[in-house]
Image (spheres, rainbow, N blue to C red):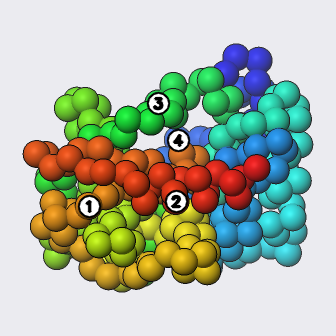
Amino acid sequence: MPGGYFVHNGQLFREGKPVISPDNRSFRYGDGLFETMRVISNSIILKKFHFERLLKGMELLKFDIPDFFTSAHLESDIISLCKKNRMEDAVIRLVVFRSDGGLYDLEDMRPNYIIQSIALQKLPHLKEQPGGITVDIYEEATKPCNVFSEIKSNNFLPYLMAAVHAKQNKLGDCIVLNQYGRIADATIANVFIIKNDEVHTPPLSEGCVAGVVRRFLLQKLPLHGFNVQEKPLTVDDLLNADEVFLTNAVRGVRFVKKFRDKTYTSKLTKSIQQFWQERQA
């Protein structure tokens, strides 16, 4: 983004300014985590859920979190950056990592962070696909089910390779399986299926990321007449589903049209899409 700015540890820098060294632990080991957020009209969508997940993940990774490192502080940095870059609507990437050091000689456990704002027109893959997307299974790696599974770790390799597979095969996304061969999530989204008007999604114990839109829908849909359950899902469940959709903070609710030889309908998914969109207005 030529001429744009980013934030590093609370300070504004022009894009292209080097701020990390070759000894950076995120670069070396994937030591850290990130959030990808959507800003609409200078407001962070589901900001409470984003910052709760971030701070919970930082505690899990044993960061020494200083008093100033609060959701209000980060929100101020994000909105100031958007204004500096003249973006009312943007995608925000917030990356948190530890300072330089080797694997065992780390002394400083405090967080460093970088915030970027990206204009939506710079992300053509976010273009709406009202006809739905085609998905398949990424079979070359699985995701473990452990305490780290639900955070958005800087160690992103299985998802990265699944995204490469999706692009090479002209797919809209790829499903990632867990260590038991069941559905975890997709490359950057949670997976929901609909069967007989019941909405199902894997529980966090199945290795999926604790998605903010997933959390929102699990809380709100039952209050509006939807039957929603968390349950382990198999590939056969995917094949036998009536409808499938994916969710994340940037793209919202995406309709899956096809998985292998299976074609899905979208009647209830469209209602859920509308439910989501009305709450972003």
Q: CA distance from mark 4 to mark 3?
A: 31 Å
Is residue 32 in sight in this rendering? Answer: no
Q: CA distance from mark 2 to mark 1?
A: 15 Å
Is residue 269 in sight in this rendering? Answer: yes
Q: CA distance from mark 3 to mark 1?
A: 26 Å
Residue at point 16% right, 64% down?
A: 240
Q: Which secondary structure, mark 2?
A: helix
Question: In the displayed structure, would residue 107 be above or below residue 33?
Answer: below
Residue at point 74% right, 74% down?
A: 65
**Badge 4 amino acid:** Pro
Question: In the displayed structure, would residue 224 be above or below residue 4?
Answer: below
Residue at point 54% right, 77% down?
A: 225
Q: Are marks 4 and 1 in contact (CB under 8 Å)?
A: no
Mark 4 or mark 3: which is in front? 3
Q: Which secondary structure, mark 1?
A: loop
**Badge 2 amino acid:** Ile
Q: Which secondary structure, mark 3?
A: helix
Q: Mark 3 or mark 1, which has the lower sequence index?
A: 3
Which corner quadrant of the image does residue 242 belong to? bottom left
Q: Callout 3: few (<14), some (14-19), or many (20+) C-alpha neighbours within 10 Å?
A: few
Q: Which residue is mark 2?
A: 272
Q: Which mark is residue 219?
A: none
Q: Callout 2: few (<14), some (14-19), or many (20+) C-alpha neighbours within 10 Å?
A: some
Q: Which residue is mark 4?
A: 22
Q: Which residue is mark 3?
A: 125
Q: Which residue is mark 1?
A: 242
Q: CA distance from mark 3 to mark 2?
A: 22 Å
**Badge 3 amino acid:** His
Q: Nearer the viewer, residue 66 or 161?
A: 161
